[in-house]
Image (cartoon, coloured by chain):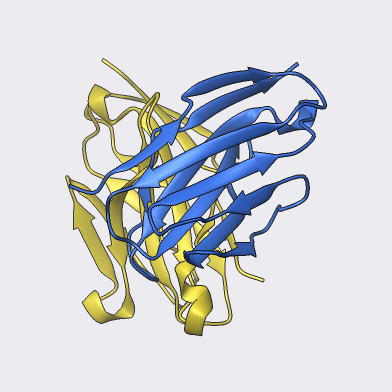
Amino acid sequence: GDSVTQKQGQVTLSEDDFLFINCTYSTTTYPTLFWYVQYPGQGPQLLLKVTTANNNKGISRGFEATYDKGTTSFHLQKASVQESDSAVYFCALAPNSGGSNAKLTFGKGTKLSVKS
Amino acid sequence: EAAVTQSPRSKVAVTGGKVTLSCHQTNNHDYMYWYRQDTGHGLRLIHYSYVADSTEKGDIPDGYKASRPSQENFSLILELASLSQTAVYFCASTPTGPYEQYFGPGTRLTVL
């Protein structure tokens, strides 16, 4: 079945540091890939979404992720983090295969803590 | 603005008791989902539904039932709550796949 791997359980940075969160996936289809962000006490919300239709790259609120089919990766980056970016970040995959494309498979999440 | 609400927001239940978690969406979305979140496991799909009066098993359905009496409402039922079901539960909706899923604020369930 489909799977998403986030090896970093926790990342601690200082303000203005560069952020890189690793995400790799496994699927037999051409997937749609997502990054969700979850702030404390809230449900996850979409940060960005990428399909092969939008040049494999998504950008939102200074965050950027590129879908690399060759390495099956979808890493999240941000040039300069702020304390307000502290949250849990989830990588997720939706297969493009008929009715099952409404199901998302989530990674385990990466908790980002940014110190001022 | 998409809206998914959950009730209760927090609940303490006894082992062996029955627990019902409710979800309501005003998005006019076809799909609704129940996930549980545990530290170290991320979000895992329990049940989902794409039409009223029909539910589907997700990845971890054991010990849970679901009910979708209308397009707007989706319930998660624990007939015999167990300690291992202590977690935060999230409901979500989407018009169809693979679009954005809109999540509710979550229900923190503690089983004692």
- Locate residue A11, reporting x and y percent: 46, 31
With B1 as the anchor, is B82 left or right in this view? Answer: right
- Locate residue A8, reporting x and y percent: 54, 40
Q: Colour of chain B?
A: blue
Q: Residue at x 63, y 30 (%)?
A: B87
Viewer-closest of A88 and A78: A88
Q: Colour of chain A?
A: yellow
Q: Is residue B88 above or below residue A66?
A: above
- Locate residue B82, reporting x and y percent: 79, 29
Viewer-closest of B65 and A55: B65
- Locate residue B30, reporting x and y percent: 38, 65
**Residue A97 visible in the displayed image:** no
**Total labels drawn:** 0
The quadrant in which residue A16 appears is top left
Q: Residue at x 46, y 24 (%)?
A: B9
With B86 as the anchor, is A5 left or right in this view? Answer: left
Q: Residue at x 26, y 22 (%)?
A: A83
Q: Residue at x 50, y 54 (%)?
A: B33
Point out the image quarter for the C terminus of chain B: top right
**Residue B111 visible in the displayed image:** yes
